[in-house]
Amino acid sequence: MHTENLDAWKHEHVFGQDEVAPGERRTLVVALLTASFMVVEIAGGLLYGSMALLADGLHMGSHAVALGIAVLAYVYARRRARDARFSFGSGKVNALGGFAGALLLAVFALLMAWESVERVLFPTPIAFDQAIAVAVLGLLVNGISVFVLGAHDHDHDHDHNLRSATLHVFADALTSLTAIVALLAGKFWGANWLDPVMGIVGALLVARWSLGLLRETASVLLDFQAPEQVRREVREAIEGDDDRVSDLHVWSIGPGVRAACISVVSHRPQSPDAYRRRLPARLGLRHVTVEVHRCPGSPPRATAA
């Protein structure tokens, strides 16, 4: 067989990763919005002498950095989609961006907890009116950001980069909301202690979010097997008559994209393409390798005369 005849059997490993991802533009808008309001909060904290505003502005700055990482991950994955050095395309850059964002979220939670405990031990005066006004504005900005990202969009099920960005926005919103509650309680009832206590509660919740995302993204980066339900559907689709799946590996190679390596044993084996056609499209299997084995002692397949 001449080398040029092999071209018909070759295929790309891009899997649509060279296209602009649904969450890329939305994440960029939210990153710019977050960075802009970060400047407002830091300036307000310095102008009004409010440590609460300054701290919230610095917290928002950490989220702006995380959102920037998410944007860079989208751009890098898209521009490197055809880079032959990636065995299955650049889809895992998305998970890597989500993992980095989750790490920053965990660091943010630790800083929140540290600062809150410090304020319990060493209370500081608060400029209530100015702090409340900026916190309310911050919550409004977070609400707009959630709307832009599309918190209930189905893309979140597979796009870890987008989910990381959304969790950072939710963490910002949680910080603003707890700050408003605490500041109102401090202003009208003198419960200044509630501000750091709410900070500790918020830090615990943010830590829980970050750990969940770390587990999910790490499972993609380490090539964990796909969920049992997916593997079961693959087996049920392939196995029929005396066809049996002897070895099965299904793993994620990008947002909503999976690869599979399937070993089939049969007395009357079909062609690899015949087994591939049995797989449901909804499983997102874009790169499937089928290895076919004939059971020992089985008669060869009958061929047409």
Image: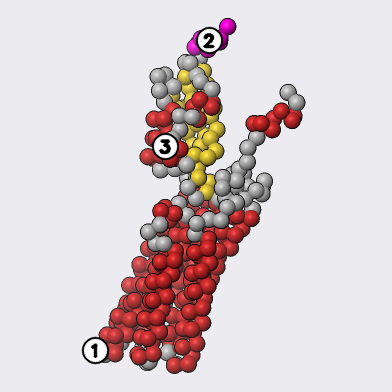
- The residue type indicated by label 1 comes to Trp
- The residue type indicated by label 2 comes to Ala
How far from the left and from the top, in percent, is residue 92? 55, 51
How far from the left and from the top, in percent, is residue 211? 41, 60
Q: If the image is split into quadrants, where does the C terminus sit? A: top right
Q: Main secondary structure of the magenta part?
A: loop
Q: How far apart are marks 3 and 1 (CA)?
A: 57 Å
Residue marked by disc 2: 302
Q: Is residue 136 left or right of residue 24?
A: left
Residue at the location (50% across, 42% down)?
258
Which residues lie in the magenta part? 297-305
How far from the left and from the top, in percent, is residue 241? 40, 19
Residue nearest the viewer, comparing 177 with 189: 177
The crowding category of the residue bearing disc 2, from other C-alpha atoms within 10 Å (few below 14, some 14 to 19, many at least 20), is few
Residue nearest the viewer, comparing 128 with 304: 304
Residue most toward the top?
A: 305
Tell me, yes or no, whether the highlighted magenta stretch contains residue 299: yes
Q: Where 209 sits versus 113, above or below? A: above
Q: Mark 2 or mark 1, which is nearer to you?
A: 2
Residue marked by disc 3: 231
